[in-house]
Image (spheres, grey):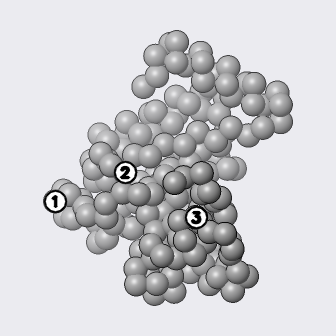
């Protein structure tokens, strides 16, 4: 949770963004130390995002990029797959925040080269697309982590798999 001083700083940042017609998106990357099946962990995540919402933030992102895909033993006993675990937590948080108009999800397989075995047959991406609530936008960088070109055909393919158009994420400064 944020301290009073941090809360004041974030509130000021959110207000400054709004006064300049900028949507500030509060993003969090809980995937490294989150136990998806832990009610305590999920409650803490919801509480943190709820706190940020009280500062005036209206847009959120949960980022699961660049993390290991292995689940801990506790999660293996509850979820069929890593994608199921991420969908469960993300949907729960989204609903807890009363389904904000701007809510983004970054999948672990966020580009074609990370899709196993490929975009069309990735069990992970197909689960994300079929089970993530429809109001949640899914981020995608294209064929590569840093894509110089994204074809219409590749967008059509990922749109079909995700069952919604992707939010294109320009990752050019990531590496």
Distance in Å between CA atoms under marks 2 and 3? 21 Å
Q: Residues within 10 Å of mark 2 (few under 14, many from 20)?
A: some
Residue at image mark 1: 73
Q: CA distance from mark 1 to mark 2?
A: 15 Å
Q: Position of residue 88 (x, y in %)?
A: 41, 59
In space, the residues marked 3 and 1 are separated at their CA atoms by 33 Å
In this view, the mark in front (1 or 2): 2
Counting from the top left corner in percent of width and height, residue 158 is at 60, 78
- Residue density around tag 3, few if under 14, some if 14–19, many if 20 or more, within 10 Å: some
Task: Quickly name the residue at label 3.
Answer: 146
Helix, strand, or loop for circle 2?
A: loop
Circle nearer the viewer, 3 or 1: 3
* The N terminus - image quarter: top left
Taking the image as shown, residue 44 lies to the left or right of residue 136, namely: left
Of the two numbered discs 3 and 1 on the same chain, state the one appearing first in sequence.
1
Position of 88 relative to 83 (above/below): above
Q: Which residue is mark 2?
A: 31
Q: Residue at left 27%, top 50%?
A: 35
């Amino acid at each position: 949770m944020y301290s009073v001083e941090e809360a004041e700083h974030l509130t000021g940042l959110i207000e400054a963004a709004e006064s300049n017609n900028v949507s500030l998106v509060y993003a969090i990357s809980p995937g490294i130390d989150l136990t998806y099946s832990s009610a305590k962990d999920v409650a803490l995540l919801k509480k943190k995002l709820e706190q940020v919402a009280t500062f005036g933030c209206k847009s959120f992102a949960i980022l699961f990029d660049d993390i290991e895909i292995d689940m801990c033993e506790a999660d293996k006993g509850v979820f069929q797959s890593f994608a199921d675990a991420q969908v469960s937590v993300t949907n729960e948080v989204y609903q807890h925040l009363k389904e904000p108009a701007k809510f983004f999800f970054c999948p672990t397989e966020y580009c074609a080269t990370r899709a196993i075995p490929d975009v069309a047959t990735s069990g992970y991406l197909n689960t994300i697309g079929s089970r993530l609530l429809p109001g949640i936008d899914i981020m995608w960088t294209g064929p590569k982590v840093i894509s110089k070109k994204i074809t219409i055909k590749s967008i059509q393919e990922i749109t079909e798999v995700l069952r919604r158009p992707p939010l294109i994420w320009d990752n050019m400064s990531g590496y």
